[in-house]
Image (cartoon, rainbow, N blue to C red):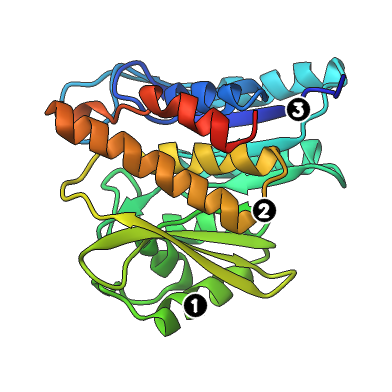
Amino acid sequence: MHQQKRIAAIHDISCFGKCSLTVALPIISAAGVEVSAIPTAVLSTHTGGISGWTYRDLTEDILPIVDHWQSLDLKFDAIYTGFLGSFAQLDIVANIFDRLKSPDNMIIVDPVMADNGMLYQLFPPNFPAGMKKLCTKADVIVPNITETVLMLEEPYREGPYTPAYIESLLEKLARLGAKKVVLTGVHFDRHQLGAASYDSQTDAISYAFDNWIEGYYHGTGDVFASALTAALLKDIGLAQAAEIAVDFTVGSIARTKKAGTDIRFGVNFEEGIPRLIQQLGL
């Protein structure tokens, strides 16, 4: 019997609204990977389009959790981070990478901080510089186009894009230090939307597209990054992992749109898990 893989997922937890840990835990667990969680904050709901939410910061609890894990000599096949709410948390997570990194494991950073050309309101203008520094420690980064241009200190451009522009962004991102880059929100027309991937070790660029579904659906970045992470941990190649993640994410959006669910409440990824398990070869 093979040894079960284990991942440390460092995200906030929104008690309602399908994002961050409430997405990462079930999706990665469905791949047969053990998920150990470090919650960075607890919110009553996510903050996108919903008012009146409660928030409890857990910054002071993060390192004691890691201290205890190290006292147990726990090892991890991957460390996966998403939304980090402050410079203090960026510094703490950088420290965790140093402490839990091994020659054989993988650090995956989803630099959640912006979308649609704008930095999220709770972040100061210099936050992208801090996130950029964290990304230098990653093996895999999964930014969207807004997060990319903020870290690269370039102006935001509305799509559709050209392959030359997207590939230039991929190469610049790889120069930050990550071996593998997956860029989301890529589109060359208004019919298909997806992701572009770059493996700097093989110099291979690939694309994964599916039908464009109009509307802004909260939590889809977390759904995509978690499915991508699950595939990578099953030793699936980067290009195929991105294809699986795009298919899973678009399917989740399509089910949600068909049901007429309030788009603030997250997407129906749960009913796509059986198909994901098949695609992962389980």
Residue at disc 3, secondary structure = loop
**Which three-letter amino acid code belongs to the residue tagged 3?**
Lys
Give the residue drawn at x 57%, y 28%: 28
**Which three-letter amino acid code belongs to the residue tagged 2?**
Gly
Give the residue drawn at x 64%, y 22%: 35
**Which three-letter amino acid code belongs to the residue tagged 1?**
Glu
Q: Is residue 98 left or right of residue 193?
A: right
Q: Nearer the viewer, mark 2 or mark 1?
A: 2
Tag count: 3
Q: Nearer the viewer, mark 2 or mark 3?
A: 2
Find residue 164 and report its horizontal and vertical position in percent: 44, 84
Q: Give the residue at mark 3.
A: 5
Give the residue drawn at x 22%, y 26%: 265
Nearer-the-camera pick, 182 or 123: 182
Give the residue drawn at x 74%, y 69%: 201
Residue at disc 1, secondary structure = helix
Residue 167: image tag: 1
Does any portion of residue 218 appear in the rendered image? no
Label 2 vs label 1: CA separation?
19 Å
Q: Give the residue at mark 2.
A: 237
Find residue 149 and report its horizontal and vertical position in percent: 40, 69
- Is 149 rendered above or below residue 3? below
